[in-house]
Image (spheres, rainbow, N blue to C red):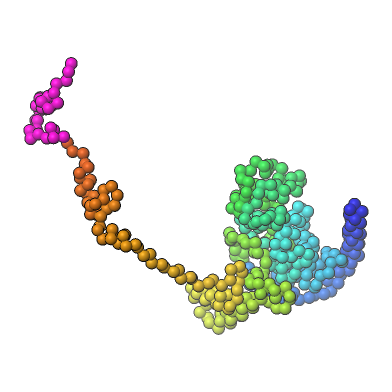
């Protein structure tokens, strides 16, 4: 085992040396060739176009993003095969200029959540970076929750244990950056053993060191794509406090098993995505023809109608995980047949039990009989009108008190 491990380490060192030498030799050559080539950016996917339109990203900005994308390709390893519209995950770290080593883990896990492990496509590069740069602090805390779950390989995404948090943030225990250092946090003395999403968000607001690396990563990406001035313009970028799902950074959401099989085979897009694209084109054509869409109420009504048509139940596609909602089951109502003796007893209308033998509804009479009544010797027709007369009446009825 020791010899095998030694051989593997030697091979990895050789590959690292080859990659380093190749990057130093071919890196300047790639940079020179990129100066003479002015390629047009590839056409993004429909989902990415929708996001860019919603964020008011102009074609000029897309050209800047593509220049940055080509600059990142210069840092790709010569041992990694990438297509013209792909770059490596390691090259994406070059977008961070300061404290790169402290946010590299978060960047890799973020791309892993989006479905990119070794290479990142042009569509994924645009979608992930634009989505991540537009998040608020509350949404970043939710993303950090999924990042910790991904790194710790948690069995569930519903909660994190204090030991998992301690293991993840152990790398920042001796961090020289004061805002990243977790030396002052004692995870063993935290009030909870399991932290769900809401509890983790409160913990991030209490200890800012837990979310500061993620915020620094966002700020670094905003500086490179395209600038902080653009992301600070609230007329273009609207701040939300949305609930972030685990597939938030995937621009192609999988909705059916058939779609998974077709994408895995590489034949075509899934039926649900195809139907959504067809309905989207119809909606765009209707928006161009009808000038009534300037009215906000009519626009919302049209959007609701289009979303109703895009539901998979109307197309016969079985979505995950439970399929089309089945029809409501009709429950059988069985009539209970009472025995003959119960019919006879109910006909008599008598109360059962110790007080039985009487018709129902005589409870008032029974209560009147049980009520406490004054003794007969206290019933007198004469009413005393003074204290002396009352004393005389008491003596005559109850007697004298023995002295």
Q: Is 382 placed above or below 225 here?
A: above
- As rendered, which of 128 and 70 lies closer to the eye? 128
* Residue 106 belongs to the span the image colors magenta: no
First to last magenta residue range: 375-403
Q: Residue drawn 75% across and 55% down?
A: 105
Task: Check if residue 388 falls in the magenta segment.
Answer: yes
Side of 358 relative to 125 (left or right): left
Indicate the position of residue 77 as horizontal and vertical percent values: 85, 64
In which quadrant of the rendered view does residue 12 lie?
A: bottom right
Q: Is residue 324 left or right of residue 356?
A: right
Residue for point 61% across, 80% down: 278
- Name the residue at 62% across, 58% down: 139
Residue 130 locus on image (x, y percent): 68, 65
397 and 130: which one is in front? 397
Residue 43 visible (yes or no) = yes
Image quadrant containing the C terminus: top left
Res. 134 in view? no
* Residue shown at the point (66%, 57%) measured from the top left: 146
Q: Nearer the viewer, residue 150 or 282?
A: 150
Residue found at the very far top of the displayed protein? 403
Indicate the quadrant where residue 56 lies. bottom right
Q: Is 367 on the left or on the right of 102, as rendered?
A: left
């Amino acid at each position: 085992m020791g010899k095998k491990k030694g051989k593997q380490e030697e091979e990895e060192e050789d590959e690292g040396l080859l990659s380093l030498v190749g990057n130093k030799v071919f890196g300047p050559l790639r940079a020179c060739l990129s100066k003479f080539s002015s390629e047009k950016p590839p056409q993004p996917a429909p989902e990415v176009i929708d996001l860019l339109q919603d964020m008011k990203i102009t074609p000029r900005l897309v050209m800047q993003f593509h220049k940055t994308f080509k600059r990142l390709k210069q840092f790709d390893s010569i041992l990694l095969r990438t297509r013209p519209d792909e770059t490596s995950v390691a090259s994406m770290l070059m977008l961070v200029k300061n404290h790169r080593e402290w946010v590299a883990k978060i960047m890799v896990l973020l791309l892993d959540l989006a479905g990119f492990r070794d290479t990142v496509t042009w569509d994924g590069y645009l979608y992930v970076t634009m989505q991540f740069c537009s998040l608020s602090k509350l949404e970043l805390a939710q993303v950090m929750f999924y990042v910790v779950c991904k790194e710790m390989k948690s069995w569930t995404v519903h909660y994190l244990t204090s030991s998992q948090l301690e293991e993840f943030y152990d790398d920042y225990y001796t961090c020289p950056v004061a805002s990243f250092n977790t030396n002052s946090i004692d995870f063993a003395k935290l009030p909870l053993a399991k932290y769900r999403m809401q509890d983790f968000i409160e913990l991030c607001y209490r200890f800012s060191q837990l979310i500061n690396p993620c915020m620094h990563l966002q700020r670094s990406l905003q500086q490179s794509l395209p600038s902080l001035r653009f992301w600070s313009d609230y007329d273009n970028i609207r701040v939300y406090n949305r609930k972030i799902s685990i597939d938030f950074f995937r621009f192609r959401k999988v909705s059916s098993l058939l779609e998974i099989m077709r994408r895995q085979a590489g034949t075509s897009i899934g039926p649900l995505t195809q139907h959504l694209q067809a309905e989207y084109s119809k909606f765009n054509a209707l928006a161009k023809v009808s000038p009534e869409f300037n009215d906000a109420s009519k626009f919302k009504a049209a959007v609701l109608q289009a979303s109703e048509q895009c539901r998979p139940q109307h197309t016969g596609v079985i979505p995950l995980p439970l399929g089309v909602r089945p029809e409501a089951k009709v429950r059988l109502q069985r009539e209970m047949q009472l025995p003959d003796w119960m019919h006879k007893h109910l006909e008599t209308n008598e109360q059962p039990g110790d007080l039985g033998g009487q018709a129902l509804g005589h409870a008032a009479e029974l209560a009147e009989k049980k009520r406490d009544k004054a003794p007969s010797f206290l019933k007198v027709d004469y009413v005393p009108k003074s204290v002396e007369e009352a004393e005389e009446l008491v003596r005559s009825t109850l007697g004298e008190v023995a002295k």
